[in-house]
Image (spheres, helix red, strand yellow):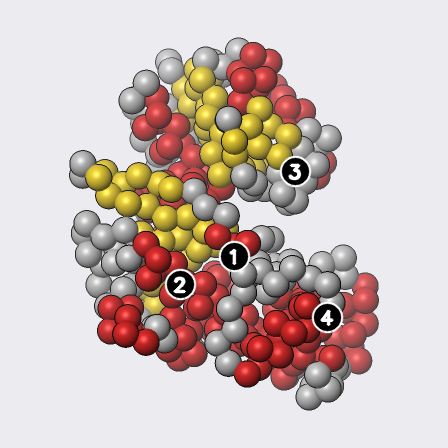
Amino acid sequence: MSLLLAADVGGTKTDLAVYDPGQGLSRPVTEATLASRDYRSFSLLLRAFLDKNRLGIERACFGVAGPVLNNRVKLTNLPWEIDGSDIGREFAINRVDIINDLVAVASSIPHLAADDLLPLGEGKPRQEGAIGVVAPGTGLGIAFCVRDDGAYHVCPSEGGHAGFSPGNAQEMALLGFLLDQGISPSFEALCSGSGLPNIYRFLIAGGGFTEPERLAIELARSADPTPVIVQWALHPGKACDVCRETLRIFVRILAEVCGNLAVTVLATGGIYLGGGMPAKILPFLREADFLARFRQKGKMSTLLGDIPVYVIKNPKAALIGAAAYGLKAHAHN
């Protein structure tokens, strides 16, 4: 039996699964989620998984958060380096493909069911149109797909590191705040899990909001302020104005990123929101601000009004996409 090993490798956790091509992507032979930081290297994590699942793996595909060059990647948020050739030799796997995690998410889109997606607004996709993928997680990932010969081809990108472009006076002040703090003013510096606290600090520094004492205590005790801010923004009993405003600014900037990508690649096939954050902040994405800002593109506003935006709800989308990429690569080998 010829088996494919797929993985979605992140700074916090790694999802792994083994697939039998004859069974398709909906029924993995086995799967597991391991805490990435419990292992000094990806090789050790992989050994722990494979030792429990002694299966004959012929090929593998790993979606990894970081820029991939020559089938090798250094993770953005973890001190790991992964080389496809080294992994192949160590584990006797005939072919190992390393792809960017956003390439993996984008590769999943043709394989997602309607229940895996939540539409925002009423746009309709054009069948032959390009597709854009924006994924705010720990960082900000961006990719896109173009259609050729009846199939989608995924193009990687590091567009999250493009320069932040303010759209109003408040965002001009936010840009100034980033510069004053010595923070490179990229979209990722604001529109990501690591960037959202910069918006919060900007609002507190501006003096227009009072920080609740209990919130200040929670933030001081937390290694990661983002989940705390999000919880206080969403919790109906906490009534935190500064956290809610932080999320509203975040959502408007996310809409700007999506609109920029839509006009850049002419994404008439739709914009898909992945990553860890969109599904957690749906009440804010459903507010009118998001779609209004997305479509705020002057002469292109009518075009963007027809482009649908979807939130990917399936948390295993990147894993499914890595498997789909690996199977496609093998078929064309």
What is the C-alpha distance between the residues marked 3 and 4? Answer: 34 Å
* Residue contact at pointers 3 and 2, CB within 8 angstroms: no
Question: Which image quadrant for residue 230?
Answer: bottom right
Mark positioned earlier in the residue sequence (1 or 3): 3
Disc 2 residue crowd, few under 14, some 14–19, many 20+, Cα 10 Å: some
Three-letter residue code for mark 2: Asn
Query: Disc 3 vs disc 2: which is toward the camera?
Result: 2
Mark positioned earlier in the residue sequence (4 or 1): 1
Q: Residue beneath label 1, please?
A: 162
* Residue contact at pointers 2 and 1, CB within 8 angstroms: yes
At a point 67% along the width and 33% down the height, the residue shown is 80
Residue at disc 1, secondary structure: loop
Question: Which image quadrant for residue 226?
Answer: bottom right
Three-letter residue code for mark 4: Asp
What is the C-alpha distance between the residues marked 1 and 3? Answer: 28 Å
Residue at disc 4, secondary structure: helix
Query: Disc 2 vs disc 4: which is toward the camera?
Result: 4
Q: Residue beneath label 3, please?
A: 36
Query: Disc 1 vs disc 3: which is toward the camera?
Result: 1
Three-letter residue code for mark 3: Ser
Q: Residue beneath label 2, please?
A: 260
Disc 4 residue crowd, few under 14, some 14–19, many 20+, Cα 10 Å: few
Image disc number at residue 180 = 4
Mark positioned earlier in the residue sequence (2 or 4): 4
What is the C-alpha distance between the residues marked 2 and 4? Answer: 26 Å
Mark positioned earlier in the residue sequence (3 or 4): 3
Task: Please tell me which residue lies in front, 152 or 187.
Answer: 187
Three-letter residue code for mark 1: Ala
Horizontal side of residue 4 vs 305, given as left or right: right
